Image: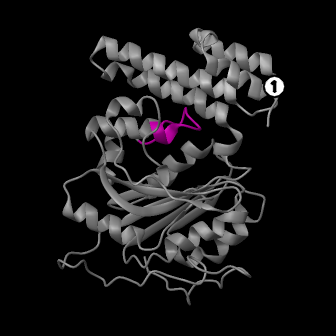
Amino acid sequence: MYCPIIDDIPPPQKDQTGWPWTEETTPSVSIMPDGSPWPKISIITPSFNQGQYLEETIRSVLLQGYPNLEYIIMDGGSTDGSVEIIKQYEPWLTYWVSEPDRGQSYAINKGFEKATGDIFGWINSDDYYTSNALCHIATIFKRNQTSWISGVCDIITPDRQVRLGNESEPPEFENWLIKCPLSQPSVFWHRELWQAVGGVDTRLQYSFDYELWMRFSEKQSRPTWTNRHLAYFRVHPSSKTFTSRESFHREDWVVFRRNIHRIDNILKRISLNLKRREKSANFYISISNRSIPVPKKIFIGLSYAPWWIFRKIFYYKVKNMIFPG
């Protein structure tokens, strides 16, 4: 696909400056430094009613200056002006569609069915890449015998502040069972790895990326790490991360149950199960969702870790739920 420059694409929104509005990545030469062609990178953006953020996502992909890019947008039938935004950038898209679908995980799989690249990644319609991320990723794949790569992902907070991501390598696998170790926008993988695991599990709608990393790890134990900041993950009032914490929590338990058998030591399994239960107790006894009555939160929390009733932290958290602030 032709790699556009900033003068080719629609002008930036009023009052928007900096990357990727008024700045671009310097376009790369047509071949890699060693004389080989750049691998084709396929990026999928699943989208549904995220029009206020979508254009920034699109521009961060198109203005990468990457000479062998395939960009596909799978919109779930948005009614908020997203389609009009997509149409503005249609000349630089490989494929796009806007139609009702069966959710985000389904849209991602359908998008990658259209993809023909050597390297895959997806970026949600409220997140965006840093400048020069794709050339950096392609170079790492070229230099390493690796099936997947992960890097640093910064967070855009609801008040539009940037919180820098963790530059440390992912922890040992047993810790993956307690918390998802990777930030989805900054993970990329070979086409063959995707095909080997069969894509994302469409039975999941929240923790499907977490579950995918687990299946990737069965083929290659961990991704090749780069401490380069590759993407921005945006937290905002309408994001799944903000509105569906309980749904993520429930699906995280699905991931745990599917993978705990990979720990050989029975005592370690018991220990991890207890840690996971304590994490659940902490989640419910701290949750700020006002739609759940405090007694119900306490009951659910103690159902995961009944021994918490003998701990000071339990009473401290209950007091904070009853008398917040």
Farthest residue to the front: give it: 312
Circle 1 is placed at which residue position?
Answer: 322
Q: Determine the residue positioned at 53% across, 76% down.
A: 92
Q: Is residue 203 magenta?
A: yes
How far across and down, in percent of the image, does residue 74 sit?
A: 58, 57
**Quarter location, residue 301:** top right
How would you rate the neighbour count of disc 1 (Cα within 10 Å): few for under 14, some for 14-19, many for 20 or more? few
Image-based side of 147 in relation to 283, left or right: left
Relative to 176, say whether 300 is above or below: above
Residue 135 in view, yes or no: yes
* 281 in relation to 252, above or below: above
Query: Is residue 236 magenta-colored?
Result: no
Quadrant position of the C terminus in the picture: top right
Locate the N terminus by quadrant.
bottom left
Q: Where does residue 123 sit, x and y in percent of width and height?
A: 52, 58
The magenta span reads: 199-210
Instruction: Report whether residue 122 is seen.
Output: no
Q: Residue at x 50, y 70 (%)?
A: 61
The percent coordinates of residue 269 (x first, y second) are 36, 16
